[in-house]
């Protein structure tokens, strides 16, 4: 049975015999995400409510999203797809879709329309960057710094190139252990114009230029792999400043009251969302589709913004974003899309990294090993 026929059957059967259709759905579902504050926001906003409405369903979480591409390749090669729904960044969704490891979706068939009747395709708009990608949030990778470690008489860091200024801002840095974002920031701070970054980075000479700039701080870098690493390194005072996701910094600053400040300059905008692995059995696919229809509707994505400072991917969700569910503070000013935070943004190029990621990864890892 084809994907679209399954969707049509689901819609039809839900109208006439929901109990019978429910019996055709799997009772277990493995969701793959990133752990930490973000995964917690997913649980609170839609996974827990979905489970409460479907008491026969057991949801298991796997925190392997950072390794999703490699692990899905391995599962596919072994003929044993153990994951049901995987949270990935947009560039990884494009790669998985191109390799046939993620299933194509029909937004207007598989995703809920907006409350005013606007189609899902129009509601998500340009954020549907792949035929396999189901957007959830707009987030950014930016820098946090220890406010109590700023040298006396010096203004707190506010420019992306302060990351490379060890004289004015001494101390360890935390950078993600991958080329993405680091290469772009390095070129920006080596004099390359923002609109020329990817033209330069696609050349071997441009890649070497970025690595040479990173060489200037390499001895002072602690490399991170998990989103929780930098907030912990900052909390422990092991680094002066470090890159991470803006929602992780929000959690450390507002929820944990850590002495951390945000540096929004050249924050890298990116998208995160779900992909459905290709080749799921029909009962598991039916369960996943039912969950996705619920978890990505207008209200649920707005609900998620009540727990973490990521912008919902639906236009119709934005007006529903209000206060933090527990702290009672307005969430709007903490979003990466807030005007005062978005004065100088860097827009991530999904297509570039989908095309060049494997090759540049190899070069980056070889540089790290030197």
Image (cartoon, rainbow, N blue to C red):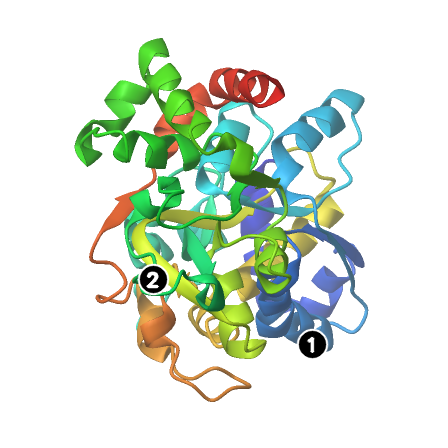
Classify residue 145 as left or right of residue 53. left
157 relative to 271 in the view: left or right: left
* Above or below, comparing residue 305 to residue 177 in the picture: below
Tag 2's secondary structure?
loop
Q: Quadrant of residue 312?
A: bottom left
Pointer 2 local density, CA inside 10 Å: few below 14, some 14–19, many at least 20:
some
Residue 71 lies in quadrant: top right
Q: Which of label 2 and label 1 is nearer to you? A: 2
Residue 346 at x, y = what percent? 28, 44
For the image, the number of numbered tags is 2
Q: Give me the residue at 58% from left, 16% from top.
A: 366
The foreground one among 87 and 143 is 143
Q: Quadrant of the C terminus?
A: top right
x and y percentages locating residue 185 in the rendered image: 34, 37
Q: Residue under circle 2?
A: 156
Q: Earlier in the sequence, mark 2 or mark 1?
A: 1
Residue at 80 percent across and 56 percent down: it is: 28
Q: Is residue 210 visible?
A: yes
Residue 360 at what x, y percent from top left? 47, 19
Quadrant showing the N terminus: top right
296 is higher (above) or lower (below) than 44? above
In three-dimensional space, the C-alpha distance between marks 2 and 1, rounded to whole angstroms, equals 48 Å
From the viewer's side, name the closer residue of 116 and 82.
82
Instruction: Verify CB contact (< 8 Å) between mark 2 and mark 1.
Output: no
Q: Which residue is mark 1?
A: 53
Nearest the eye: 219 or 187: 219
Vertical arrangement, residue 54 with respect to residue 60, above or below: below
Q: Is residue 1 visible?
A: no
């Amino acid at each position: 049975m084809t994907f679209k026929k399954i969707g049509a059957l689901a819609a039809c059967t839900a109208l006439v015999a929901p109990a019978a259709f429910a019996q055709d759905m799997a009772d277990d579902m493995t969701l793959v995400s990133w752990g930490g504050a973000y995964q917690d926001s997913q649980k609170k906003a839609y996974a827990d409510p979905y489970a409460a409405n479907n008491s026969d369903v057991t949801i298991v979480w796997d925190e392997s999203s950072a390794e999703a591409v490699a692990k899905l390749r391995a599962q596919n090669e072994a003929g044993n797809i153990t994951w049901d729904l995987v949270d990935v960044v947009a560039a990884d969704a494009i790669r998985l879709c191109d390799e046939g490891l993620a299933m194509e979706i029909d937004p207007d068939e598989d995703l809920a329309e907006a409350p005013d009747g606007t189609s899902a395709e129009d509601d998500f708009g340009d954020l549907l960057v792949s035929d396999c990608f189901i957007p959830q949030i707009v987030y950014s990778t930016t820098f946090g710094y220890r406010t109590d470690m700023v040298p006396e008489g010096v203004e707190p860091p506010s420019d992306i190139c302060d990351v490379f200024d060890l004289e004015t801002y001494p101390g360890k840095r935390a950078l993600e252990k991958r080329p993405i974002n680091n290469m772009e920031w390095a070129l920006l701070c080596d004099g390359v114009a923002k609109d020329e970054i990817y033209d330069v980075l696609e050349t071997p000479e441009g890649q070497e230029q970025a690595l040479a700039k990173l060489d200037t701080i390499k001895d002072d870098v602690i490399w991170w792999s998990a989103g929780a690493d930098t907030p912990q390194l900052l909390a422990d005072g092991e680094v002066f400043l470090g890159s991470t996701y803006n929602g992780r910094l929000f959690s450390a600053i507002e929820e944990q009251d850590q002495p951390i400040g945000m540096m929004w300059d050249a924050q890298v905008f990116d998208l995160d969302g779900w992909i459905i692995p290709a080749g799921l059995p029909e009962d598991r696919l039916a369960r996943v589709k039912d969950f996705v229809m619920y978890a990505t509707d207008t209200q649920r994505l707005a609900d998620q913004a009540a727990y973490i400072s990521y912008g919902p991917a639906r236009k119709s969700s934005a007006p529903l974003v209000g206060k933090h569910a527990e702290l009672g503070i307005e969430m709007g000013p903490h979003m990466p899309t807030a005007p005062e935070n978005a004065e100088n943004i860097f827009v991530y190029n999904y297509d570039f990294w989908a095309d060049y990621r494997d090759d540049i990864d190899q070069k980056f890892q070889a540089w790290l090993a030197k």
